[in-house]
Image: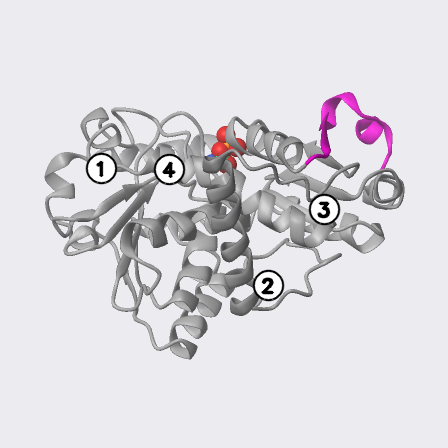
Amino acid sequence: MQTSLRGRDLIGDLDFTKEEVETVLEVAFDLKRKRALGEPTPYLRDKVLAMLFFFSSTRTRGSFEAGMARLGGHAAFIESQTTQIKHGDTPVEVGNIYGRYFDGISIRHCDWGLGNAYINEVAKYSRAPVMNMQCDIYHPFQCLADLMTIMEKKGRDLRKKRIVVSWAYANSYLKPISVPQSLILQMPRFGMDVTLSYPKEFELMPDIVKEAKNQAKTFGTKFDIVHDMEEGFKDGDVIYAKSWGPLLTTNDPAEGKRIQDKYKDWITDAKKMALAKKDAVYMHPLPADREIEVTNEVMDGPQSVVFDQAENRIHVQSAVMALTMG
Ligand code: CP
């Protein structure tokens, strides 16, 4: 167990070592158990978290805010449009000033080519730890919740288990690529084989894929890329199928939508789920485009673990906050 996390930022999935992630999970499982027993967990009494959002959220906002309250502290919701950021405050001001007001700063900034750089810049100037609530490259807290959920469903030893990280069609908006990128980076460290499946225009960032392959090599796991949804699903233990935008192919949203619309048959349905192992679980970080990205039959069916997955956001986030902000 590595316990020296006080004051540390969590911006990229590999910022914490495997042992440090194991510590986070230990604490998260303990917090979940204590919540079930009604035991108080006031590890951050009198501490305050800034939650700075440049993008909408249901789960991330709710779970960080509720998590801070359960830890005995407070979370301040700050929406970028109602700050002076649009009138000139830069990450230098945000880092320096919020770092003095708050005991932690969490930021969601998903704009392509901007978000991750912004969060890192705030971290450079902040004396308080900075947490990435999702950027254009990573969604580390989603990935920690996903890992916790997979361990609950498949056991703590995930060697020889295979996660299928598959693209799926959506028409609501061009979704960030951060979730699949975080998954392919983190899961090999915990022994999982990874199959990444997407139509050719939906490739992930080459540096991220290269690093994911390095992780797979280091931890002795398999890493495959296929371009066929059915082929990807075959014999998978965990089916993690969600949409993301063709951001490496085009920056034009209209062109992105045109490309996306070619692949309407990439929907997760019962027929495709039947290709996976009998006891496979279906995962999605949400929000999902129901009946477009995934059928209601799958989403609300016995293999779906999406609500456990959403619940676990609060436990992993509370664990990281307690370890870094205490
Ligand atoms: N999965 C996730 O991050 O959900 P929100 O966008 O609602 O926060």
| Residue 148 within the magenta-colored segment of the rendering | no
Q: Which residue is mark 4?
A: 308
Picture residue at 73% right of the left edge, 31% below the top: 74
Spatial separation of the CA atoms under disc 1 and disc 3 = 34 Å
Near-viewer residue (105 or 153): 153
Q: Earlier in the sequence, mark 3 or mark 2?
A: 2
Q: Earlier in the sequence, mark 3 or mark 4?
A: 3
Marks 1 and 2: which is nearer the front? 2
Q: Earlier in the sequence, mark 4 or mark 2?
A: 2
Kind of residue at disc 1: Thr
Q: Which residue is mark 3?
A: 118
Residue 221 x %, y %: 33, 72
- Circles 1, 2 touching at the beta carbon (< 8 Å): no
Image quarter of residue 255: top left
Image quarter of residue 266: top left
Q: Quadrant of the N terminus?
A: bottom right
Q: Is 271 left or right of 11, judged from the image as shown? A: left
Badge 2: residue crowd in 10 Å (few <14, some 14–19, many ≥20): some
Disc 3 is placed on an element classified as: helix
Spatial separation of the CA atoms under disc 3 and disc 4 = 31 Å
Q: Which residue is mark 1?
A: 268
Kind of residue at disc 4: Asp
Q: Which residue is mark 2?
A: 16
Spatial separation of the CA atoms under disc 3 and disc 2 = 20 Å
Mark 4 sits near ligand 1, with its Cβ under 8 Å away? no
Q: Which residues are magenta?
A: 72-89
- Circles 3, 2 touching at the beta carbon (< 8 Å): no
Residue 242 x %, y %: 35, 40
- Circles 3, 4 touching at the beta carbon (< 8 Å): no
Near-viewer residue (78 or 35): 35
Badge 3: residue crowd in 10 Å (few <14, some 14–19, many ≥20): many
